[in-house]
Amino acid sequence: QVNLLQSRAALVKPGASVKLSCKASGYTFTDYYIHWVKQSHGKSLEWIGYINPNSGYTNYNEKFKSKATLTVDKSTNTAYMELSRLTSEDSATYYCTREEDYVFDYWGQGVMVTVSS
Amino acid sequence: DIQMTQSPASLSASLEEIVTITCQPSQGIGNYLSWYQQKLGKSPQLLIHSATSLADGVPSRFSGSRSGTQYSLKINRLQVEDTGIYYCLQISSTPWTFGGGTKLELK
């Protein structure tokens, strides 16, 4: 069965960076794009961008281009998102999700990032 | 960016009632629209894709439709387990954008 297992919650200081992970299992990792979605507390969802695990090609929402960096490690079937220069605006829950034909069919459980000194 | 105007923002309905949620994109998106349900503390789950296609395993009381440039999610005979927040998502052009969400509660 398909599963996307995300890393634990993170508490990080303002100005620091954090690298979130999303470990895929139950399918061929390189066959499906991985997307990342942000959900601020009590708010709607924002699409951050996606990565093609096979080629490493990325496509970012312009809003997150200087904030997020998407990478993969094919040897461990893991996708990563690094968030840099964190501020309180980056405190949110972040989801990874698998895309099949423009549909997000499987989601990770989400990881809460809290930016606080 | 394509803005997705979703309404209503919140909705209270009775068991077995019919519920309709709509999304209006700021420009044409064809059938590149999907609907997701998010229960409290959980990840969103796919309900409808391609505007009208029911996702695998989703109860048939859920349906999606399109009338011109307006998209709707309809729940026939509302059940207790249908409470949560519903989002539309356009995947016609990047950046992909979600509607603001509709919080559905039982009356």
Image (cartoon, coloured by chain):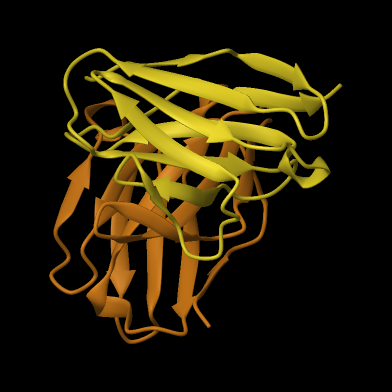
Colour assignment, chain A? orange
**Shown colour of chain B:** yellow
- Residue B2: x %, y % from top left: 24, 20
Q: Which residue is at a point 40% across and 73% down the rendered structure image?
A: A78
**Residue found at the very far right of the displayed protein:** B107
Describe residue B40's horizontal placement relative to residue A44 as left or right.
right
Give residue A112's position: percent from left, percent from top. 64, 45
Query: Is A7 located above or below residue A88 in the figure?
Result: below
* Number of disc labels: 0
Query: Depth check: B91 or A59 in front?
Result: B91
Residue A55: quadrant of the picture: bottom left
Asked whether the viewer can see residue B21, the reply is yes
Residue A86, image x and y in percent?
48, 33
Image quarter of the C terminus of chain B: top right
Q: Quadrant of residue B4?
A: top left
Displayed quadrant of residue A60? top left
